[in-house]
């Protein structure tokens, strides 16, 4: 039994005969008759009494006709809902965002998204990037903000690349002294985020590549608290430049890290080969285009003409 057969049967009843129904469904009369017989074969009883030139419904035909009207109406409602989702008038965006950088990068994009697609419900999950990748891997969200590089199981779209800035007490000899190497801080305790933040991985791996393991003074998930600890002289904290610029009001000194391998490289990631909903694709289209040269320019790096970033 299929919707086309039901539709033909309903039109036979509505039009009062096979010939008029054939005109309505743009088919030959023999095709209409064959469709009704097929439906009768499937239900196992006659649906139309073909006595003489008149065609009337049997008792079973009455039941099938009423049910067919409901099924066809449900089919129309289903297709209307699908069309709404395709047109992004309905749907759900399941999005994971990290605390670091979201207010600067994603808040404007999310506001633009809501203005453009007000019917899309946004389910927001907030964790550090490492934890967000776990949630994404489990299929609980469609997209997550995370730092590159990511595992091969994910596809990604770049969002923003920024150099890291070390935040230091004003009296620290390296505060506001210009770009520095991270190993210049080997004797300074580090103030890191909690374990679910991918920024820790970038910092610690950069230190190990340069032959030292930093002393970790404290870990926290609160950006403002970490900045205040750095300003108070507890150690060096680290933020991407676009966030560090906003922290000068805390009276904290700054030193740009002069390494490309410590860059904060934010991307939107999703499971490789997973289905991306129309709502998720629309979110990717709302994101700012990454400028891969911005971090190099911040460090004073100039690429030769014709080079590929």
Image (cartoon, helix red, strand yellow):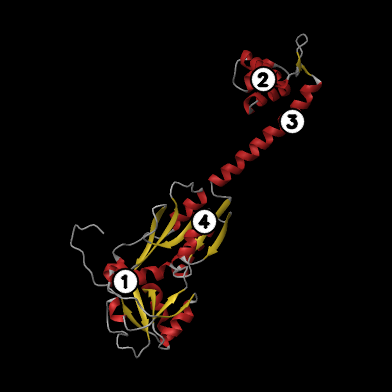
Q: Position of residue 106 (x, y in %)?
A: 46, 64
SS at badge 4: helix
Q: Are marks 1 and 3 in contact (CB under 8 Å)?
A: no
Q: Which of disc 2 and disc 3 is earlier in sequence? A: 2
Question: In terms of depth relative to the viewer, which is nearer, 226 or 124?
Answer: 226
Q: What residue is disc 4 on?
A: 116
Q: Which of disc 1 and disc 2 is earlier in sequence? A: 2
Q: What residue is disc 3 on?
A: 67
- Rendered-image quadrant of the C terminus: bottom left
Q: What residue is disc 1 on?
A: 208
Q: CA distance from mark 2 to mark 4?
A: 44 Å
Q: Residue at x 52, y 51 (%)?
A: 279
Q: Residue at x 28, y 84 (%)?
A: 177
Disc sitting over residue 21 in the figure: 2
Of badges 4 and 3, the one in the foreground is: 3
Q: CA distance from mark 4 to mark 1?
A: 46 Å
């Amino acid at each position: 039994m299929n919707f086309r057969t039901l539709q033909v049967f309903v039109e036979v009843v509505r039009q009062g005969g096979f010939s008029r129904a054939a005109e309505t469904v743009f088919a030959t009369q023999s095709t209409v008759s064959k469709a009704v017989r097929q439906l009768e074969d499937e239900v196992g009883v006659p649906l139309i009494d073909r006595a003489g030139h008149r065609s009337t419904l049997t008792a079973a035909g009455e039941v099938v006709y009423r049910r067919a009207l409901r099924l066809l109406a449900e089919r129309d409602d289903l297709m209307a809902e699908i069309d709404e989702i395709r047109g992004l008038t309905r749907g759900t965006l399941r999005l994971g965002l990290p605390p670091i950088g979201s207010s600067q990068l994603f808040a404007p994009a999310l506001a633009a998204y809501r203005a453009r697609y007000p019917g899309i419900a946004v389910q927001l999950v907030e964790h550090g990037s490492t934890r967000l990748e776990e949630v994404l891997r489990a299929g609980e969200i469609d997209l997550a903000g995370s730092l590159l590089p990511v595992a091969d199981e994910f596809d990604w779209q770049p969002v923003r690349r920024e150099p890291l800035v070390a935040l230091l007490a004003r009296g620290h000899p390296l505060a506001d002294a210009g770009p520095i190497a991270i190993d210049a801080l080997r004797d300074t305790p580090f103030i890191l985020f909690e374990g679910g933040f991918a920024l820790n991985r970038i910092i610690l791996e950069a230190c190990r590549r340069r032959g030292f393991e930093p002393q970790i003074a404290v870990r926290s998930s609160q950006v403002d608290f970490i900045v205040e600890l750095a300003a108070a002289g507890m150690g060096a904290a680290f933020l991407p430049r676009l966030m560090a610029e906003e922290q000068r009001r805390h009276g904290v000194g700054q030193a740009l890290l002069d390494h490309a391998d410590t860059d904060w490289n934010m991307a939107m990631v999703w499971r490789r080969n997973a289905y991306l909903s129309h709502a998720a694709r629309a979110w990717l289209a709302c994101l700012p285009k990454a400028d891969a040269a911005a971090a190099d320019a911040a460090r004073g790096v100039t690429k030769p003409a014709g080079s590929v970033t």
